[in-house]
Amino acid sequence: MAVELVKTTERTYPIYLEQDFSRLPKAMEEAGLTGRTVCIITDSNVDGLYGAQVQEALAPVSKKVHKIFFPAGEMQKNLGSIRHFYEAFFQAGLDRKSVIVALGGGVTGDMAGFAAATFLRGIAFVQIPTTLLAQVDSSVGGKVGVDFDGHKNAVGAFYQPHFVYINAKTLRTLPKREFSAGMAEVIKYGPIWDMDFFSQLEEKKEALLALEEETLLSVIGRCCAIKAEVVGQDEKESGLREILNFGHTIGHAIETASRFSLLHGECVGLGMIAIGSLCEKRGTVEQGFTKRLSQLLEAFSLPLTVSGLTVEEIDRQMAFDKKVKNGAIGFVLLSSAGVPLRTTCVTEEERKEAIAFVLAQ
Ligand code: NAD
Ligand code: GLY
């Protein structure tokens, strides 16, 4: 069942929300991708869990299905891995009609998408996200790329998949910490778009933690709908799409400064708390907003503070962010809860106080 259509200049593509891989051949057919040479890219963890199943599901509708995997983890998200992929593509005889299938979390999707965008100047690709973060955010919208010399996502492109196929049952094998990290990106959609959705998350937190099927599907579906709407309005992030970076300016800086010892989603959670405190101080959100946000993040075992880092380290790191334009750092604040405000008008004092808010004493 296609729950959502993402409308972009390259194409309009569906997001399928499923409970197994059985409709994958049909999805390939609907995308006009049958009879091709396919190369699945996955990581060392996901390969053992789902690699064979996906390879089997694709075989009847493909000319040949190759599979390559890389060692799991953000540390592998670099040009060295992309080089290995290109070598494997040539060995497998991939051509301009071939299809890359990204099977895994955001690291896999971002790298496989970047390889697909650049190999032979661009070949078709498909996203099969298996982490919550990838299902609600990274697999939709075509941001692909790698880290470079410690700079997050510094080299990349906008390159849309032909479709996104979510098998929500894959979340059953996801480590709890990874599920929680994904919940930070889920929670993000509340303050920037839909506070009713935020309230629903508060009400349904036990059901979500228990991976209760119906709740999970409706939450993933709502996130995909919001993301599709935002990407449809601003594919290349010239304006509106920046709101999806809520919590990311400070979050990315913490992620890099912590040398990736914290997960992306955990850092986004910290970044959202920091910005919540800034907005509360400005009076644009009600008193207690940050506490409410923190309580929901805490319900999913997300960290509320970070230790071992200084305000200066994190602040310095922000200067390297992609969100810096003409020397000014871009922030997503809230003009009220549920209404984002994109701005570069944040004083150094406000910035540093916000960072200090999430540093452990
Ligand atoms: P990830 O891809 O590293 O996956 C996290 C871990 O979970 C890995 O160890 C992986 O092997 C494992 N895993 C994946 N699926 C599993 C499953 N079903 N069962 C068991 N284990 C499983 O990380 P992530 O959190 O999915 O993604 C983070 C990355 O996404 C970052 O690099 C971030 O920059 C990027 N990102 C991109 C966008 C975008 O728009 N492109 C948006 C947000 C984040
Ligand atoms: N995750 C932010 C974006 O896709 O724009």
Image (spheres, grey):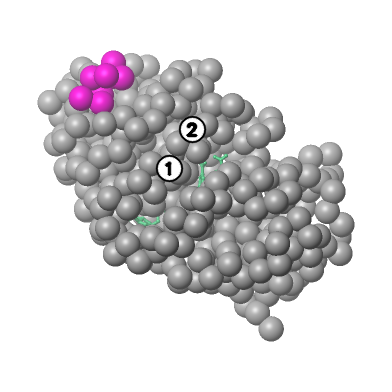
Q: Quadrant of residue 355?
A: bottom right
Residue 235 visible at all: yes
Q: Secondary structure at mark 2?
A: helix
Residue 111 position, x and y percent, is 45, 40
Residue 70 position, x and y percent, is 35, 49
Name the foreground residue: 195 vs 77. Answer: 195
Residue 317 visible at all: no
Mark 2 vs mark 1: which is more N-terminal? 1
Q: Secondary structure at mark 1?
A: helix
Residue 328 position, x and y percent, is 83, 45
Q: CA distance from mark 2 to mark 1?
A: 10 Å
Q: Residue at x 63, y 59 (%)?
A: 272
Residue 336 vertical placement versus 260 (above, below): above
Foreground mark, 2 or 1? 1
Let me know if residue 30 is in the magenta part.
yes
Q: Label 1: which residue?
A: 222
Q: Is residue 259 left or right of residue 282?
A: left
Q: Label 2: which residue?
A: 228
Name the foreground residue: 76 vs 305. Answer: 305
What is the magenta range?
Answer: 26-33
Q: Residues within 10 Å of mark 2 (few under 14, many from 20)?
A: many
Q: Which mark is residue 245?
A: none
